[in-house]
Amino acid sequence: MAFVTASNIPVCVLATAEAAGEVAADAVMTRLQRGFRERGHMTLGCPGGRSLRTTYAALARMAADRGADLRSLHLVMMDEYVEARGKGWVTCPADAHYSCRRFGEVEIRAVLNAGIPPQAQIPAANLHVPDPNAPQDYERLIEQLGGIDVFLLASGQSDGHVAFNPRGCALNERTRVITLAHDTRRDNMGTFPKFRSLDEVPRHGVSVGPGTIARHSRSAILMLLGAGKGTALRRLAAAAEYDPDWPASVVLACADARIVADDAAVRAMQT
């Protein structure tokens, strides 16, 4: 494990994605425990997708090994696909292969609960997804929860999107419905490989904004894993503050922030 500094925040570099997940999970567990001591509950801001899978898996192992009680853990999903319906919006079906709610249920809540006794598991009601017809309610929910103990972040490979926030997104943007950028939709074909063509990827989503992340994060971890994230690491290393042209740079505006990367991302950054 090595530590370097980029953009005035620490970057922890591990040999593999699995090792990076272990380090991130240990930091998450520490912050969640602090949240429980301070407020009686814990909050985790969760993206869907590939970048955090090793973190979720490592966190599940730690929770099981330590006999953690997860009943007070709230999983705050960062986004969801939506489509227009009349004058409003509807979220995609919860069982759709690309549903962020489905990802949260299957790949986060179920994974974390797997080694925990039933009486100590995360209840279904503690998995939260923004309502596209009342996005301001999501901001209020996060405030009522006392903020997010750890916002887990990922960066779009080709455009630096974070959640569904596209290039050009201002730092003060909050939870809202977004028209998805072409590059974001293309990246999401990798996140959800059952998409057979770009035309199948929805064109709209509801998402927390950079302002939501920066304002409500008690801490933040940006995971950059694999050679495909070399550009993201290079962009973040060069940034001194939030850059609207690379929204994942919101990590620079977060409290107690760090970047965790693997050797593959660092090697790609240097080429």
Image (spheres, helix red, strand yellow):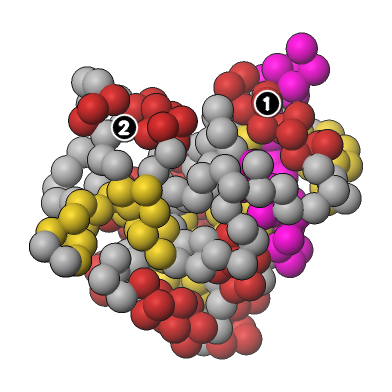
The question of residue 253 being in magenta is answered with yes
User: Horizontally, is 230 left or right of 50 in the view?
Assistant: right
User: Horizontally, is 125 left or right of 212 in the view?
Assistant: left
Q: Nearer the viewer, mark 2 or mark 1?
A: 1
Q: Where is residue 196 in the image (x, y as percent from the top left)?
A: 22, 21
| Image quadrant occupied by the N terminus | top right
Q: Residue at x 67, y 54 (%)?
A: 250
Q: Residue at x 27, y 34 (%)?
A: 201
Q: Where is residue 120 in the image (x, y as percent from the top left)?
A: 35, 72
In this rendering, the answer to whether 194 lies above or below 216 is above
Using the image as rendered, state which of residue 270 and residue 207 is in the foreground. 207
* Extreme residue in the front direction: 87
Q: Quadrant for residue 212, please give it.
A: bottom right
Three-letter amino acid code at the position of disc 2: Phe
Three-letter amino acid code at the position of disc 1: Thr
Mark 2–mark 1 CB contact (< 8 Å): no
User: Horizontally, is 55 left or right of 123 in the view?
Assistant: right
Q: Residue at x 57, y 43 (%)?
A: 167
* Extreme residue in the left direction: 86
Which residue bears the numbered disc 2?
192
Q: Label 2: how many residues lie within 10 Å, few (<14), some (14-19) or many (20+)? A: some
In this rendering, the answer to whether 72 lies above or below 185 is below
| Image quadrant occupied by the C terminus | top right
SS at mark 1 in the image: helix
| Numbered range of the magenta stretch | 246-271
